[in-house]
Image (cartoon, coloured by chain):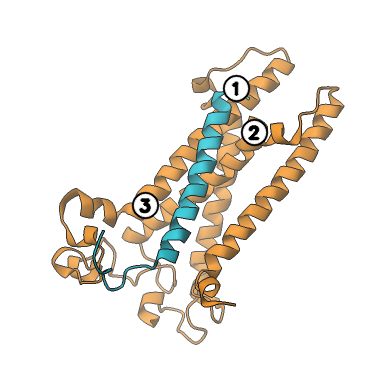
Amino acid sequence: MSGRPRPGAASAGEHVVFWCWAAGIALGLATMIVVPLTGR
Amino acid sequence: MTARIRDRGLSLLFGALFLLALAGQAVAGYADEVQRQSEHGAAVPGFGEFLLSSDFLVDVAENWQSEFLQFFVFILATVWLVQRGSPESKKPGDEGVGSDEDQRVGAGASAASAGWARRGGIRRLMYSNSLLIVMGAVFVLSWFAQSLAGHVVMNAENAEHGQPPLSWAQYITSPDFWNRTLQNWQSEFLAVGTMIAFSIFLRQRGSSESKPVGAPDDESAVESE
């Protein structure tokens, strides 16, 4: 991932949007799986 | 409004709506839990304790799984099935995964195509199905989470009533698990089917979910572009 960005590539902002959603969903899934496994 | 915010308006709106609705669910769910525990003369959990309890998380998980199932099925079905006149559908005759040229992969890729679209093998296969794979994975994991949290809640209720605990395998074949699951699935499939059927004849001027107002009823979104 070096050199000039390819034409049509998403900006850094679009990557931030993608990873914010992915992180939120991963956090939610992890919470919903781990908490019941602890018996709470 | 700066261009930075304007260009991301949809994700910002839905992210904010999600957080507000989840907060509202937490507050209302806690009030309900306090009321139920008080009626039984049981100890009332703190708010933080409630948020990290299976009582709250099973309700979150059962809705998550059905939403991601909805999109998983919709994405998969729209590859192979069409609905004449619906902007949600490709036009009749375009069923299937499309040619490399249409999909701009392999020899059909352009300089603007992502690296994994230009390459062959497993990487192109993964990238070509990445939306379906991720939505399907979130569905399976949240449905699994629902089963774990529902199992804890069911056994807590069984203990209160002097009933023996169920194993996880017994729980996932229980009426409680399938009632929680199917009550969500039915509404998702109804909403998607309604959107497909109604968007043939109804319009919303300016929405990407609708055909142009003056487009003929038998024209799909792809044709009207």
Quarter-wise, where is residue B20 in the image? bottom right
Quarter-wise, where is residue B218 in the image? bottom left
State the residue at coordinates (64%, 33%): B52
Q: Are marks 2 and 1 in contact (CB under 8 Å)?
A: no
Circle 3 residue:
B132
Note whether residue B174 is visible.
no
Q: Nearer the viewer, mark 2 or mark 3?
A: 2
> Dot 1 falls on which chain?
A
Whole-percent x and y of residue B213?
52, 84
**Display colour for chain B:** orange
Of the residues shown, which amino acid type is indicated by label 2?
A: Leu
Circle 1 residue:
A39
Give the residue furthest to the bottom. Answer: B214
Whole-percent x and y of residue B54?
63, 31
Circle 2 residue:
B52
Placement of the C terminus of chain A among the 4 image quadrants: top right
Q: Nearer the viewer, residue B194 or B172?
A: B172
Q: Are marks 3 and 1 on the same chain?
A: no
Q: Residues within 10 Å of mark 3 (few under 14, many from 20)?
A: some
Quarter-wise, where is residue B80 in the image? bottom left
Q: Secondary structure at mark 3?
A: helix
Whole-percent x and y of residue B120?
15, 55
Q: Secondary structure at mark 2?
A: loop
Q: Is residue B174 left or right of residue B128?
A: right
Q: Nearer the viewer, residue B104 or B66?
A: B104
